[in-house]
Amino acid sequence: NAGVTQTPKFRILKIGQSMTLQCTQDMNHNYMYWYRQDPGMGLKLIYYSVGAGITDKGEVPNGYNVSRSTTEDFPLRLELAAPSQTSVYFCASSWTPQETQYFGPGTRLLVL
Amino acid sequence: AQSVTQLDSHVSVSEGTPVLLRCNYSSSYSPSLFWYVQHPNKGLQLLLKYTSAATLVKGINGFEAEFKKSETSFHLTKPSAHMSDAAEYFCVVSDRGDYKLSFGAGTTVTVRA
C-alpha cells in the first residue's frame, strides 16, 4: 500500500515552459487536493476534486489546471511557468474533508 | 468562512520540558480540527484530530490537544519534548459541509539539548 505518490520529486523549469505534476493514490479516496507551500505561508489550496470527473478551484488556482479522469489520479498542469510558481507542491487525499488527509512527499519546483 | 491563526511562528524548548503550540480558529459551523507535523523535506503527517467527540484529544508521540469552543482554541501540548519533535506544526480547520481545509501559517519547533 503506497498511499499517495508524487512525481517528479524535483524539477527546474524555464519561464514559459509547461509541465504536469503527477499524483496517484491507492486508497480509493474520493477527495483529492493540490496544495502549494511557500516559506512561512503554510499550505494554500490550488484545486480539489470530490470524485472522478469533478474538480473545483481552491484559493490560488491561477496558472494551473487539473483533471480527474480516474479515482486514483489527479494531475496538476502548469501551462506557462512563471517565477511566482516556484514552490513545493503537495498532493493529498481523504475519505471526506473531515477525515485525515494523507499527503504525498511533495514536488519541489524551481522556475528560472 | 473558516480560518486559523497560529499564535507563535517559532517555539524553542529544552529537551525534557513541556511544549505548547497555540492555535485559534474561526468557523461558521461545527468544525473539525487537526494538527499536522512536517519534518524537514517531508510530507505532512497527522498528529491528531478533533471531530466533535471528546474535547481532549490524544495523538501520536505523546501529543494532545484540547478543544475549547468558548475560546475558539485548539492548543497542542506535550509534557516532555524530545529531539525528534523538532519540526513544523500546522493547525488546520474544516467546516462541516465544506470540501476544503484551511491551514495555519505553521509553528517551527526547535528542541535544545
Image: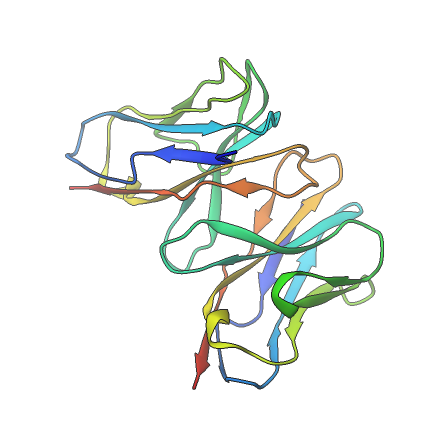
Choose between A36 and B29: the one closer to the eye.
A36
* Residue B19, horizontal then vertical, whole percent: 59, 78
* Residue A69, horizontal then vertical, whole percent: 49, 13
The answer, for residue A53, to whether it is visible in the render is: yes
Q: Residue at x 85, y 58 (%)?
A: B54
The answer, for residue B9, to whether it is visible in the render is: no
Describe residue A16's horizontal placement relative to residue B76 as left or right. left
The quarter holding residue B61 reads bottom right
Choose between A44 and B49: the one closer to the eye.
B49
Q: Is residue B4 above or below residue A92?
A: below
Describe residue A107's horizontal placement relative to residue A25 as left or right. left
Colour option used: rainbow
Q: Residue at x 77, y 49 (%)?
A: B51
The quarter holding residue A10 reads top left
* Residue B56, horizontal then vertical, whole percent: 79, 65
* Residue A42, horizontal then vertical, whole percent: 47, 54
Q: Residue at x 61, y 38 (%)?
A: B100
Choose between B83 and A107: the one closer to the eye.
B83
Q: Residue at x 47, y 48 (%)?
A: A43
Locate the N terminus of chain B by quadrant: top right
Describe residue A50's horizontal placement relative to residue A64 as left or right. right
Q: Is residue B73 above or below residue B46?
A: below
Number of numbered discs: 0
The quarter holding residue B94 reads top right
